[in-house]
């Protein structure tokens, strides 16, 4: 459906579709595509365009994505506890108590940290991200 909308040039419908936001970047489609279409890249491009143009039907997924990027830029990696907490407080506060058990389980099994941990060579990552942003703008 998404590719039919793309072929028809229905840009707003494409940007407002929730399909790209459901993509989990597993790359299964890329590996299996007989035409070598880089579908995951298409999904990323649509998401980036939707964020850039602030053109989406629902801000839940785009907010999650922007928070994730913000944390990677700040710490060099994802900070799951902060990401999940911020997401649920903003978009689904009533579901937050129901997530407590899973969160505590992950914390006690050291699968998640309560404090963010910055990577060692943050300067190098920042330089890479800055270069990527410049390339994106050119
Ligand atoms: S990478 Fe491809 S197969 Fe995987 S979720 Fe995204 S669109 Fe679907």
Image: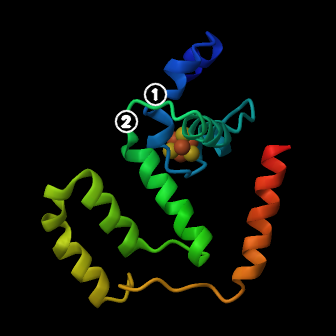
Q: How many marks?
A: 2
Q: Nearer the viewer, mark 1 or mark 2?
A: 2
The residue shown at (75%, 81%) is: 123
- Specify the quarter for ligand 1: top right
Look at the picture and state if 32 lies above or below 112: above
Q: Is residue 23 left or right of residue 6?
A: left
Separation (CA) of disc 1 from disc 2: 9 Å
Image location (x, y in percent) of residue 48: 61, 41
The residue shown at (78%, 57%) is: 132
The residue shown at (38%, 72%) is: 82
- Residue 58: numbered disc: 2
Q: Earlier in the sequence, mark 1 or mark 2?
A: 1
**Badge 1: how crowded within 10 Å, few (<14), some, or many (20+)?**
many
- Residue 120: numbered disc: none
Q: Is residue 50 left or right of residue 104?
A: right
> Which one is nearer the viewer's eye here, 13 or 6?
13
**Badge 2: how crowded within 10 Å, few (<14), some, or many (20+)?**
few
Q: Is residue 38 left or right of residue 60?
A: right
Image location (x, y in percent) of residue 95: 16, 58
Asked if ligand 1 lies within 8 A of label 2, the reply is no
- Residue 17: numbered disc: 1
Q: Quadrant of residue 36?
A: top right
Give the position of the C terminus as an image quadrant. Answer: top right
- Given contact means CB atoms under 8 Å apart, are the residues at marks 1 and 2 in contact? no
Secondary-structure class at tag 2: loop
Look at the picture and state if 68 lies above or below 125: above
Using the rendered image of the protein, determine whether residue 85 is visible from the camera's viewpoint.
Answer: yes
Using the rendered image of the protein, determine whether residue 1 is visible from the camera's viewpoint.
Answer: no
Secondary-structure class at tag 1: loop
Image location (x, y in percent) of residue 124: 78, 78
Q: Quadrant of residue 121?
A: bottom right
């Amino acid at each position: 459906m998404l590719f039919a909308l793309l072929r028809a040039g229905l840009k707003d419908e494409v940007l407002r579709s929730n399909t790209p936001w459901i993509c989990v970047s597993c790359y299964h489609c890329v590996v299996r595509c007989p035409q070598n279409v880089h579908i995951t890249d298409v999904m990323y491009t649509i998401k980036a365009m939707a964020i850039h143009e602030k053109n989406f039907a629902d801000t839940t997924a785009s907010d999650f994505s922007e928070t994730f990027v913000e944390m990677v830029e700040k710490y060099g990696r994802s900070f799951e506890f902060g990401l999940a907490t911020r997401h649920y407080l903003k978009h689904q506060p009533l579901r937050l108590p129901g997530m407590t058990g899973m969160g505590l389980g992950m914390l006690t099994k050291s699968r998640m940290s309560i404090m963010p941990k910055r990577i060692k060579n943050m300067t190098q990552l920042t330089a890479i991200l800055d270069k990527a942003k410049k390339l994106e703008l050119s």
